[in-house]
Amino acid sequence: MRRHLLSALMAGVLASTFLAPAARADGPAQYVPLPTYRVGAYASSGTLWWAGERDYFRYINEVEGGINGVKLDVEEFETEWSPDRTVEVYERVKNGKNGEPVAFFFTHGTPASYALIEKAATDQIPLIDPAGGRTESTDGTVFPYAFPLLFNYFSQASVGINYIAQKEGGLDKLKGKKIVTVYHDSAYGRETQAAVELLAKKYGFENIQVPVADPGNEQSPQWRQVREVKPDWVFLRTWGVSTPVAIKTAQRFGIPADHIIGDVWAGSEADVIPAGTAAKGYQALAPYPGGANFEIHDRLRKTILDTGKSDLKDPKFFGAVYYNIGLINAVLAVEALRTGQAHFGKRALNGEEGRWGFEHLTIDDARLKQIGFEGLLQPIKLSTTDHEGGGAARIQQWDGAKWVLVTDWIQADRETLRPLIEAKAAAYAKEHNIVPRNATAEN
Amino acid sequence: MPRRARAGLAIPLLLLLAFVGVPLVGTEYWIGAILLPFLVLSLAGLGLNLLTGYAGQTSIGSGGFMAVGAFATFGFVVHGGVPLPLALLLAGLAAAGAGLVFGLPSDRIKGFYLMVSSLAAQFFFEWLFQKFPWFYNYGSSGTIALPRIAVFGLDVGSTLGRYYLTLTIVAGLTWFAANLMRSQTGRSFMAVRDMDTAAAVIGIPVYRAKLLAFAVSSFYLGIAGALWAFAYLGSASVQSFGISRSFQILFIIIIGGMGSIAGNFIGAAFISLLPLAIDHVAQALFAGHVDAGLLQNIEKAVFGVLIIWFLIKEPDGLARLFQTIGARLANWLRP
Amino acid sequence: MSLFLETLIGGLLAGTMYSLVAIGFVLIYKASGVFNFAQGSILLFSALLLVTLHEAGLPFVLSAALTMLVLIAGAVVIEHTVLRPLANRSPMTLFMATLGLSYVVEGTAQGLMGAQVHALDLGIEDVPIFFGDVLVSQFDLIAATTAGTLALVLALLFNRTRIGISLRAVADDTRAALSIGINLNRIWQIVWAVAGMVGLVAGVMWGARQGVQFSLSLVVLKALPVLIIGGFTSIGGAIVGGLIVGAAENLAETYIGPFIGGGITPWFPYVLAIAFLYVRPAGLFGERALERV
């Protein structure tokens, strides 16, 4: 019995190796490996996220016939959000599959982006981590193969502060205000500290940082501390279960929900639903707005959802924030591939060509309208020196049942923060003996 | 003794295979993504086995001591300008010191109480290395990475270089551990494990033996942590050494075999390969037919079932099972 | 002073939430000597099942009853497939088996019922109540009452019923209990079922506070220091241990935290527990095992 089981396992391994589908006759497809987490603590975010990504890729494949006829071959690998396992997946897929090249690698998590940043530079595979990643890799001259696309952590801090200023009636009104940042005590949570410190100095508000230890399912001491401060605004940078607990505990200590601004990763349905009525009025940054009434949703509803091809188990999550995160990530990748194909020819691209595609990615308002993402995605333009390219978010507010968008795109103060990013990138270059690329020569 | 002779031949053969054979036939993926972590996990298993399997002190704080090793190596290299081999050694000693401190309560605390208190080490080090930016050289996200991995001026940053570095260290430390366990020290460890009150009666310094076990075990774990961070992943943060890592290492020694040197390697191989095997089988059997989320969860449940099944069927671990099979084979081959 | 008083009271009340989780461990450890790591995943499983049934349209009470039936069935299955084959093995092996069990339970829970976060509304408004200057949470008051009631019910069960008395017999001396004809397997099934229900109560309380989701299974890590302080074998100990841990971690975060960077709640209770162990190696209420050579 014992040996029987082992041999069965082994036979299975062999069989699956040989039974792998052969490459298509009409040129190889584009291999798109996805490290995912459908198991474990972060699965609630993950399942919707992958549904969005897969649905959009499926839409491209089945409705549009691929990108200029090049199909996307999507494959998932379970990681449980562990950076170690993501590294393993990366090693497994970086050389492509059956002749299908890899043009980019979604890390799907900031720790994994960090773990892979050097390997990817050596292997020449772009790491894509929208609204996450290593902030200083915005400077593409030092980090050619890392893309904290769309909305890096510094921009998140800046938009948060800018929105507070807007509510107060101008940046000059920030002077003397008390802004508390309650953050998940991790690399992710601390990533904005340098930016907020700089902005506090510039605008003269008081910057108070309160850490919440992981997992954060009991936060009375923290919020008691916040209450003692009597803050004007709270910037909430939590993640996972610490967000609903924070919102509930804040209510218990009498801090009004509409004076708490959540950041990107504290602004999904899963963050507010468990908090019940306490979350009513809570606002969050939304580079990925929630809602199912954008043009792309109509298209997907018709071609994917209603035909039973969706990856979503429960259609009520169609248009949830995490689903839309998936859609937007997927469209950014597809548009980058399209850009690359326009330059290199209509075929599957490799990592170096993928990088070129991302560095020349431009999505303007007209293009947004064409692809059906108007209002859902901000206009974006990348370059060698700018691997972020967006830097704006809308603000959405929870009305007790759904997210309602309350502002248009609010731009981060990227000029102020750029020197900080460049200094960090330069320090990294020095530490690793990297000669920054010439920004203009390579185009 | 014929059996002894066979074993004497097996180890050089294995080493020859590892040092010469593997690099000849292994692809970069197999060496970099399968063999490297396997070797490091084996070393970590060995570290825990010295403490738990030989000296009978249970710990689920292994991840914490691995973190000490990784962050100390980084600190010695970056802040101290110490060359890598020396930094590794010093980091191992730092981890040993940390193990000693958290082993102090072992004179009064036993069994599960001690196990749970080893969690204190786990959480304390997670907090420590995240809280104070000095440990990660004020980088923005608390991640540590070495700019260049060099041994005696030789760059070993390539996959093969890192493999050889790891293999050499693991082989050397395994040899040392095997000898240590055969010495007076090893026998006093086992006496403490089997019945510490009795050990004390016959004059073994029980507390000293326990503390030594904590220190040696943590030294191994520390080196393993450093290798995990710099030889395998390339960079690490405390998440790489969380509590699930501690459980993983505990699984290795239980499945491989407590109180067995070879068991660590067998257990680590099992832990590294099983998920891949399940993944392959599942992909081959159900891909496309079953919802991806369900499939992943089934895999997790199957992993749990296999662990329970092993505990029931092979209480002494796979090392014993292999031994039995080997003995039967030998019997069968005998003319 | 009012900050100190408020922190202390808030901490004590919050601590009873830990007690709720710890009681489930104590029951199983007392009866079968198993340190059941899967208690956390049972918490998750039971709360998730309850919510899923409730959201499917069943009334709350019926959902709870069905969940309990499933828990009883689960206890029987676990006894048959895990505990019985592993009887007389070392406590370490049993602990490992429960680790494996936690994988199975978590995989089953998320596989069958999905990974989405569910809200669980018990209709308790979590608004501040003021006693003078001191702010107290209504939710915590109710949690404390629940924990107290639960401890009382279990005490009655153990001291007044036939099952409870045979259970205590097993805990005191397994061999003697067997010799007078107590069915050990049946006792284990009952204890695991009861622990499952305690897990359900804890899961519902924690689920109401933070949403029913995977991280419920992590609450276990908070219960372990409670167990050390209170002892593995005493329900009263679990209550007192919870109070101590809750108060200590709140006070520490408020008064020590700011000096060393804050966020010390994950490890502080463990360090406290070690300190306690130094003074009382079997916990406050634990029985000290005699060692014979």
Image (cartoon, coloured by chain):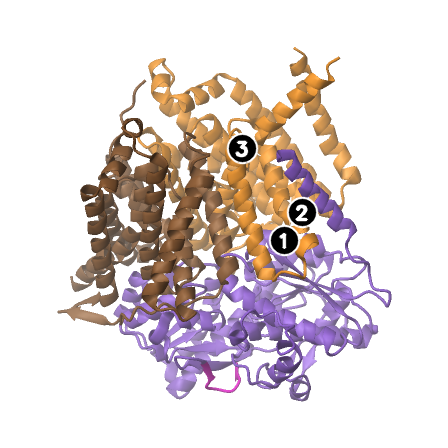
Q: Quadrant of the N terminus of chain B?
A: top right
Q: CA distance from mark 3 to mark 1?
A: 34 Å
Dot 1 crowding, Cα within 10 Å, few <14, some 14–19, many 20+: many
Is C71 on the left or on the right of A228, as rendered? right
Q: Describe the element under mark 3 as helix, strand or loop.
A: helix
Q: Any magenta on residue A409?
A: yes
Q: CA distance from mark 3 to mark 2?
A: 30 Å
Tell me: residue A281, above or below residue B48.
below
Is A94 on the left or on the right of B79, as rendered? right
Dot 2 crowding, Cα within 10 Å, few <14, some 14–19, many 20+: many
Q: Residue B294 in the image: x percent, y percent?
A: 57, 59
Which image quadrant is residue A160 in?
bottom left
* Residue depicted at x 57% and y 75%: A324
User: As shown in the figure, which amino acid type bears the numbered disc 3?
Assistant: Lys
**Which residue bears the numbered disc 3?**
B313
Give whichever of C152, A166 is nearer the camera.
Answer: C152
Q: Residue B297 in the image: x percent, y percent?
A: 55, 55
Q: Residue furthest front?
A: C181
Which marked residue is nearer to the observer: mark 3 or mark 1?
Answer: 3
**Which residue bears the numbered disc 1?**
A87
Give whichever of A152, A408 is nearer the camera.
Answer: A408
**Chain A as rendered: colour:** purple
The chain letter of the orange chain reads B
* Residue depicted at x 36% and y 79%: A280
Which image quadrant is residue B116 in?
top left
